[in-house]
Amino acid sequence: MDRSNLGPPEHIRPGGGSQNTQNRDGAAVQLKLDELIRAMKGAQNTVLKLEDMSEEELERLKAHYYQLAERAQARQKERREQKDTPHVRKGGS
């Protein structure tokens, strides 16, 4: 049987693949992401169970991360401004 015209396997074909294959692939990706989160130093293990959280819990967590991002951006801006400001030595020659 000549297989040269068959094209890619069903699970790689656009629109192809069974729901079962897609579910299994999705679960595998989720497990990989979970492992990466667990392995990262300082990672928030809270995010491992996002799919089990209520809408209210997700909104609170989203607000928390938004605040963290705002603070990080403010610190970055402050560092940039300090770097651009010439330093004057006190009591020097």
Image (spheres, helix red, strand yellow):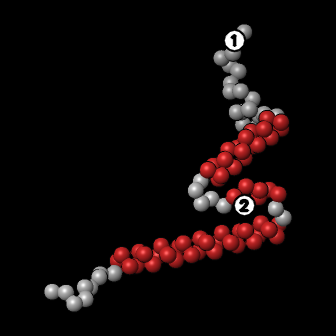
Residue closest to the far bottom:
91
Disc marking residue 34: none
Answer with left or right where residue 73 lies relative to residue 35.
left
**Height in image: 36 above or below 25?**
below
Q: The C terminus lies in which quarter of the figure? A: bottom left
**Height in image: 32 above or below 47?**
above
Q: Nearer the viewer, mark 2 or mark 1?
A: 2
Q: Which residue is mark 1?
A: 2
Mark 1 crowdedness (10 Å alpha carbons): few <14, some 14-19, many ≥20: few
Residue 40 position within the rendered picture, expressed as x and y whole percent measured from the top left: 59, 53
**Height in image: 65 above or below 22?**
below
Amino acid beneath label 2: Thr
Answer with left or right where residue 22 lies relative to residue 39.
right
Disc marking residue 46: 2
- The residue drawn where x is 77% and y is 56% is 49
Q: In which quadrant of the rendered view does residue 47 lie? A: bottom right
Residue 16 position within the rendered picture, expressed as x and y whole percent measured from the top left: 77, 34
Residue 86 position within the rendered picture, expressed as x and y whole percent measured from the top left: 29, 81
Instruction: Identify which residue, 3 or 56, lies in the foreground.
Output: 56
Q: Are marks 2 and 1 in contact (CB under 8 Å)?
A: no
Amino acid beneath label 1: Asp
Instruction: Identify which residue, 5 or 82, lies in the foreground.
Output: 82
